[in-house]
Amino acid sequence: MQKPHARLFSHYPLMQLAVAYSAGVLAANVFTLSRSIPLSLCAVSSLLASAALFGKRLTVTGVALISAMFFAGASLAAIDRTATPPDSLKQLLANGVIEEGQSLILTGVLEGPPEFAHDRVYLLLRVENVAKRGWESKASGLVALLATFKTVESEKEYRQLNLHYGERLLVKTSLNYVDKFRNPGISTL
């Protein structure tokens, strides 16, 4: 006997799509796939869903749409995994090659003009090289640097450097993840 008030999974189509997407992300993290395979399967499934919808074959449309969401999740997970180059500062920090708070020497180019505040200056540096005691490597990434002025003389010294966009800098600093947990829309400053 069928219960008239039973909650069926088919009554929640967005939940079906979310489960398919999540399963795709999980599959891409378990199995190593290139980006092109799930992306092309997602495109084929989407085209099949569109064609079946125009042909009024709703069962085929539903299955194709769920498989398209599965492959979309797998595609985005594969893209996310391969988007960060292995020499990026983010990867170097994640792999433990460099440690948070460790003293480093960064070489790079100013990505924008220095932004002076009351007692500090903000610099945006596109990193080309990173070095620490006994180790040096090419690196990539964008670092926001904060230099505080302890005295009026130190502020004058910074201003006399006359830093501009595109200038090459060698900076001794330590890296910290400032934005580990941040709500959307919150300023990075």
Image: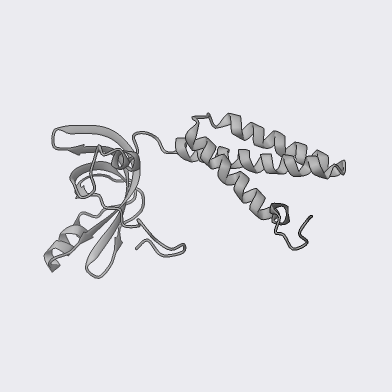
Q: What is the x, y in percent for residue 97?
A: 25, 37
**Visible in this render: residue 44?**
yes
**Visible in this render: residue 50?**
no
The image quadrant of residue 188 is bottom left
Front residue of 132/82: it is: 82
Residue lying at the far right in this picture: please name it: 55
Chosen colour scheme: one colour
Relative placement, left or right, of 62 versus 180 is right
Identify the residue at horizontal 33%, vertical 55% (top origin).
113
**41 versus 112 height, above or below:** above
Which quadrant does the C terminus fall into? bottom left
Identify the residue at horizontal 48%, vertical 41% (top origin).
80
Identify the residue at horizontal 29%, vertical 55% (top origin).
123
**123 versus 52 height, above or below:** below
Q: What is the x, y in percent for residue 170?
A: 21, 43
Relative placement, left or right, of 129 versus 75 is left
Which quadrant does the N terminus fall into? bottom right
The image quadrant of residue 6 is bottom right
Q: What is the x, y in percent for residue 121?
A: 26, 61
How many marks overall? 0
**2 versus 54 height, above or below:** below
Front residue of 182/188: it is: 182
**41 versus 59 height, above or below:** above
Identify the residue at horizontal 14%, vertical 62% (top origin).
154
Q: What is the x, y in percent for residue 125?
A: 31, 48
Residue lying at the far bottom in this picture: please name it: 118
Residue lying at the far front in this picture: please name it: 1
Relative placement, left or right, of 41 versus 188 is right
Front residue of 116/15: it is: 15
